[in-house]
Image (tube, rainbow, N blue to C red):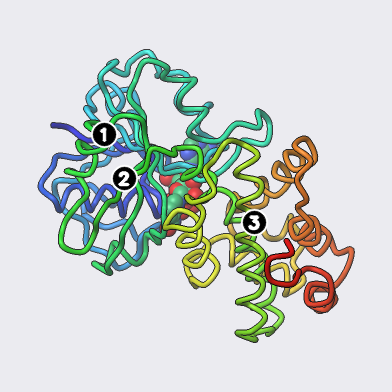
Amino acid sequence: MQVGFVGLGNMGSAMANLVAENGFDVIGWEINREVVEQITREHRNERFLPGVELHPKLRATQDLGEVVASSDVLFVAIPSVFIRKTLEPVADKLARTTIVVNLAKGIDAATMMTAFQTLGLLFPQNPHVMLSGPSIANEFSRGMPTVVVLAGRDKVTLMAVARLLDNDHFRTRFSDDAIGVELGGVLKNIYAIGLGIFDGKGIRSVNFRSSYLTIALEEMTKIGVALGARPQTFAYLAGMGDLLATSLSEHSHNRRMGVLLAKGYDLGRIRQEMGVLPEGYNTLKTALTIAEKYHVSASLAKCLWDVIHGRYEAEKFVYLFIRDFIQGEGEA
Ligand SMILES: NC(=O)c1ccc[n+]([C@@H]2O[C@H](COP(=O)([O-])OP(=O)(O)OC[C@H]3O[C@@H](n4cnc5c(N)ncnc54)[C@H](O)[C@@H]3O)[C@@H](O)[C@H]2O)c1
């Protein structure tokens, strides 16, 4: 059994290391040469996963064709915006039996497709699994207890992926609502940016944060349901669980974007500082279009868009939020 990874960034190397520690042979492709060299020489990835010793069963390469052609299970761990461009040229090398597992949580603004949908289009014959839920790579790579959701149509496929991942600190649960599980992970990034803005402004009221996250979950659920997800999925690990993890974690890229916005950084400077704009930003743009198309009210997302683009200050958003956004119980 050979397990392949596309991308050995923060998530890719953490997940690849988990599979290697569980006793499987893993080979990962990474675009950055110095990362491949350091993993090969020192079993470390200081750029993306500093301070974690990687298992020798995890090998790294810059030969994407080799990884795709030799994998029985292929995990995709690059931001959604790069998926099509990276995998299209080598798509014909993938065996039809290879299980494709998506770890990316984003929507390609150009095609309006989620990462899981893009992979379905690139590899129409293959079995697909969506992995999501509260899974901060910097935590589970250090043995911190983590439970994620594997979603897909076929239970046998889900069990095959679970065998690679489950151990005494990392466990999987199954769902057949792949679109719901994916959209929970995708949409929560929008609202994590918002929480980062409040943190950056020093607005740390637990009362406010709890109300904000409650309304964020309600809005995520409405958008998700319009796109075919089941509402219950959002009340569980891939919805509420991931929203809480990403909004509250110091390690979250999306929350960090919010913190930088609060410090007065514009989008260009954030891109420079972070290398790439976090996925929540593109998702926000796309979610607003989707909400309009399906006549779903997404007032919170709209307000965040206005704050991000400097139309008003975060403090004013807090005032508007507590004045206008919360209905009486059962009135929504
Ligand atoms: N980090 C986490 O805790 C976490 C948890 C769950 C899901 N995810 C998802 O995993 C995906 C990757 O996130 P990450 O945190 O590992 O990001 P990262 O910034 O740590 O790594 C980015 C990865 O993208 C690759 N990349 C950069 N430019 C590229 C290009 N032009 N073409 C192809 N690949 C390129 C990099 O080589 C690297 O492997 C995202 O979709 C994210 O939502 C991350």
Say if mark 2 contacts mark 1, CB within 8 Å: yes
Could you classify mark 3 by the number of other residues whose Cα lies within 10 Å: few (under 14), some (14-19), or many (20 or more)?
many
Residue 102 occupies quadrant? top left
Is the residue under label 2 in contact with that under label 3 (CB below 8 Å)? no
Mark 1 or mark 3: name the one nearer the start of the chain: 1
Ranked by sequence position, the earlier of labels 2 and 1 is: 1
Q: CA distance from mark 2 to mark 1?
A: 8 Å
Q: Residue at x 22, y 44 (%)?
A: 162
Vertical comparison of 123 with 291: above or below: above
Q: Looking at the image, is 213 positioned above or below residue 11? A: below
To which quarter of the image does residue 191 belong?
bottom right
Select label 1 or label 3 by which is in front: 1
- Which kind of residue does numbered mark 2 sit on? Phe
Q: Badge 3 is on which residue?
A: 190
Toward the front, the furthest residue is 330
Residue 99, horizontal then vertical, whole percent:
29, 28
